[in-house]
Image (cartoon, rainbow, N blue to C red):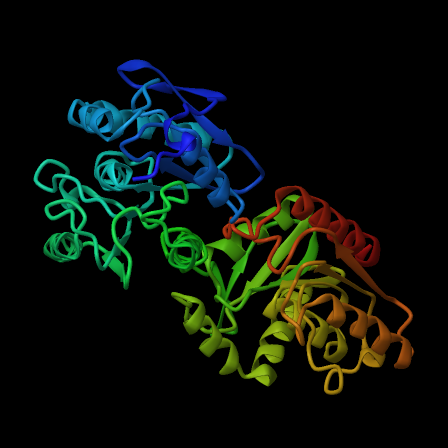
Amino acid sequence: MQANPALHTPAKKNCTFEVEGRPDGEGYLNQNNAMFGIIVIQEWWGLNESMVKTTDRIAKMGFQCISPDIYRGKVAQNREEAGHLLGGLDWEGAVKDIEGAAKHLREMGCKKVGVTGFCMGGALSIAALSFSDQINAAAPFYGVCDLDKFKLDNIKGPIYGQFGEKDEMKGFSSPDDAQRLVEAGQKAGKNVKVKIWPGVGHAFMNQDRPEAYNAEVAQQSLQEVATWFKQSKFLYSLVYQKATPTTTIGGKLPVYVTPAPYGLVVIQEWWGLNSSICKTADIMSSYGFKCVVPDLYRGKIAKDTEEAGHLLSGLDWKQALIDIEESARYLKEELHCKKVGILGFCMGGALSIASITTSKIISAAAPFYGVCDLNTFKLSNANGPILAQFGQNDDMVGFSSVQDAKRLELTAQQQGNKSLQVKIWPGVGHAFCNQDRPEVYNQAIAKQALDLAAKFLHENLK
C-alpha cells in the first residue's frame, strides 16, 4: 500500500458532544442548514484527514455531517497499528459515542439522522442502528458487525449496504458477508438490502488509497447512497402518513378543517391528503385562516414518488375542481367566512390557479411552484388576484421552473390579467416549503414565502 499523509494525519476536531456514561466525545463537524444529518464513521485508521475529506464530500450532497472520533485521539501510522487499534476497540463505548453524535445533530435541527461508515465504520454503522433509537437508517460500506451481539431484530430503520465484488475479507466484508447480512435481515423481518459493485474490492471508496480506490464506482456508490437516504420512506414520516379527515361535505367529500376567521382552501401536493399537508394547514390557521383541505384522491396516499406520479396522472381535474368549489362553498355557507382564498403546492399550486379561473366563490389565490394548462384555464377569467411563488433552482421545466413562472407572467399580460404577481425565491428549488422533505426544505425562505402569502391573502380577503 502506498503511504499517504492524509491516512496518518489526525483530523482537526471542531466539536464536542455529550455521551451517556462516558466523557464527552469529540469529532469533525460540517455544519450547514440541511435538515437531515449523517454520521460518518472512520475506517480502522482513525479520525484522519482522509475521513474529513469524505465527510465534506457527503455534506456537499445536502446533509449536515459529523464524524466522531471513535479512537478518541489515536490515529494509526501503519497497518499493524491500525490492527491493534481495531482489536482493542470498545464496541459498546463506540456505539454510545455514535449515539451522542446523533443527538448532537438533532440538537442542531436535524429532523432525521442516518449513519454511514467504511470498513470498521461500516460494521459500526450497523451496530449503532441496532443500539440507538436516535438513528433512522444506515448505509454501511464494506463491513458487517457481529450480528449475534448487535441483532438486526433491534433495528428501527432500513439498511442499504455497499460492497465490492472482489473484496477478499471473508468473515467481514466479502460478497458472502453481504449476503449473510441480507439473510439476517430477512430472518428478522427488516428492510435490509445490499449493492455489490462489480470490478472493485475492499476500500474502493478511499481516495487516499490509490491501490484500492475506484473513482467512478466511488462516485456512483456515494450518489446512490445519498439518493437512498433522501428518498427512503423513513425520511418522509409525515409525507407518507395518511391524515384523518375531520368531517365530510355532503356526506361524500372528506376534508380536514382548522379553526380561524378567514376562509382558505389548502390543496395537497401529489402525495395526497397526508399529515404533512394538514400540518401546513395548521400553520396557515395560525396566520388567521379557517382552512379546509379536501381529499382529492378520496383516501389514497402515495407511498413513494412512483405511486404519486400514478395518482397525479390519473386525477380527474374536472372532479377535483368541483371538490375545491364545494370546499370553498362549505367555508362560505357553513362556516360563515365572508371571503375565501386558495393556496396549494406543486399539483395543488396548479389546481389553485385553475380554481380561481373557474370559481365564483374563490377571491384570491396563492399558488406555490405549479402552473396549470393556461390554454384551458385562462387567466382572463380569474375571479381575483394571484400571487404565484417559485424557486430559482426548480428544474421541473414545463410545470414549475423559472421559465414556467415567466410564461405565467407573459400569459397574464397577453390575456389582460393585471392582478397576477410572481415571486421567484433565490437559491431554492422545487418543494422548498415542505418541511417534511428535509433534502429540499429551506426553513428561512419557507417562512418568508408563507408570510408573504398570508399577507397577500389577508389584504385580498378583507
- The vertical placement of 121 against 353, above or below, is above
Residue 241 visible here: no
Residue 91, quarter of the rendered image: top left
Q: Is residue 431 left or right of residue 149?
A: right
The mark tally for this picture is 0
Q: Is residue 25 left or right of residue 181?
A: right
Residue 60 visible here: yes
Estimate the x, y position of residue 384 in percent, counting from the top left.
82, 69
| Picture residue at 36% right of the left edge, 24% below the top | 69
- The vertical placement of 112 against 417, above or below, is above
| Picture residue at 38% right of the left edge, 37% below the top | 40
Q: Is residue 439 left or right of residue 391?
A: left
Q: Quadrant of the C terminus?
A: bottom right
Q: Nearer the viewer, residue 123 or 334?
A: 123
| Picture residue at 19% right of the left edge, 26% below the top | 92
Q: Nearer the viewer, residue 212 or 425?
A: 212
Residue lying at the far bottom of the rendered structure: 376
Residue 357, quarter of the rendered image: bottom right
Q: Quadrant of the N terminus?
A: top left
Residue lying at the far front of the rendered structure: 2
| Picture residue at 65% right of the left edge, 62% below the top | 394
Residue lying at the far top of the rendered structure: 23
Estimate the x, y position of residue 396 in percent, counting from the top left.
63, 69
Q: Nearer the viewer, residue 331 or 70?
A: 70
Estimate the x, y position of residue 163 in percent, counting from the top left.
25, 54
Residue lying at the far left of the rendered structure: 148
Estimate the x, y position of residue 149 in percent, counting from the top left.
10, 35
Q: Is residue 359 left or right of residue 316?
A: right
